[in-house]
Image (cartoon, coloured by chain):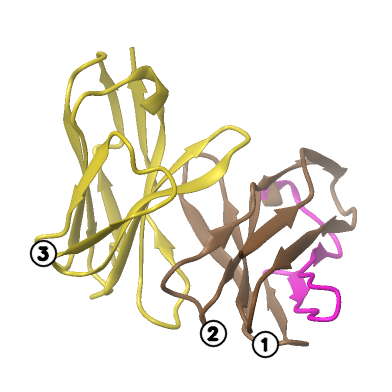
Chain colours: A yellow, B brown
Amino acid sequence: NAGVTQTPKFRVLKTGQSMTLLCAQDMNHEYMYWYRQDPGMGLRLIHYSVGEGTTAKGEVPDGYNVSRLKKQNFLLGLESAAPSQTSVYFCASTSINQPQHFGDGTRLSIL
Amino acid sequence: GNSVTQMEGPVTLSEEAFLTINCTYTATGYPSLFWYVQYPGEGLQLLLKATKADDKGSNKGFEATYRKETTSFHLEKGSVQVSDSAVYFCALSPNRGGGFKTIFGAGTRLFVKA
């Protein structure tokens, strides 16, 4: 009963490097989300998807791209990492009229 | 627009003390309200929810009542334990029941001392 799985759990990057964070859910949820969590800032929505093949910008989308090629997967990409993107990233999924289910997070440090 | 405001932390209590974490919201229509809990190193987990005015959500000894007249959803527990130490997030969803977009408060960190 995996729920929402995020990989990797930890990563250290150098400024300018690129990487992709993977989120996978096995609950057949339509909606998926990427958030970042920073001290004192709560959760901020980066991008979200309302279905396979669709994505939309959230509150803080700059510097990130996403793709939802399969219903169960939602990828978050950093094209050119910056120190300001050091954060904990959470993926969540849900269906209509249900609360969101969260993964355990990816801790990303950019040097 | 929609927003959630919750009391700043950290809140530090002794074991068996009474807990209140205040949460107020601004929303149009009839949102659903939630409390999520985040334990160290983990993601957020749903603690309880209420989908209409005067509903009381409850779980693991925690309670919160949806008060439309005061636009509040305060979290309470009669006797906290060390294992309740975590960050608590109040949240609302404009759609009844949850889903599509959820607005989160900034979180309140709770420390419980033995």
Amino acid of disc 2: Arg
Question: Can see residue A26?
Answer: yes
Per the image, label 3 sits on a secondary structure element best described as: loop
Residue A14 point in image, percent of width and height? 25, 13
Chain under numbered label 3? A
How far is the residue under mark 3 from the one under mark 1? Answer: 34 Å
Q: Residue at x 11, y 64 (%)?
A: A70
The disc at residue A70 is 3
Q: Nearer the viewer, residue B91 or A64?
A: A64
Q: Residue at x 61, y 65 (%)?
A: B2
Give the mark nearer the N terminus: 1 vs 2. 1
Quadrant of the drawing holding the N terminus of chain A:
bottom left
Per the image, label 2 sits on a secondary structure element best described as: loop
User: Could you classify mark 1 by the number of other residues whose Cα lies within 10 Å: few (under 14), some (14-19), or many (20 or more)?
Assistant: some
Q: Quadrant of residue A2?
A: bottom left
How far is the residue under mark 3 from the one under mark 2? Answer: 27 Å
Question: Can see residue B113?
Answer: no
Chain under numbered label 2? B
Per the image, label 1 sits on a secondary structure element best described as: loop
Q: Which residue is mark 1?
A: B52
Do residues under tags 3 and 2 come within 8 Å of each other at their CB atoms? Answer: no
In the rendered image, residue B81 lying in the magenta stretch gets the answer: yes
Q: Which residue is mark 2?
A: B96
Q: Which residues are magenta?
A: B60-83
Residue A68 point in image, percent of width and height? 16, 59
Quadrant of the drawing holding the C terminus of chain A:
top left
How far is the residue under mark 1 from the one under mark 2? Answer: 8 Å
Amino acid of disc 1: Lys
User: Could you classify mark 3 by the number of other residues whose Cα lies within 10 Å: few (under 14), some (14-19), or many (20 or more)?
Assistant: few
Give above or below for A79 relative to B95.
above
Amino acid of disc 3: Lys
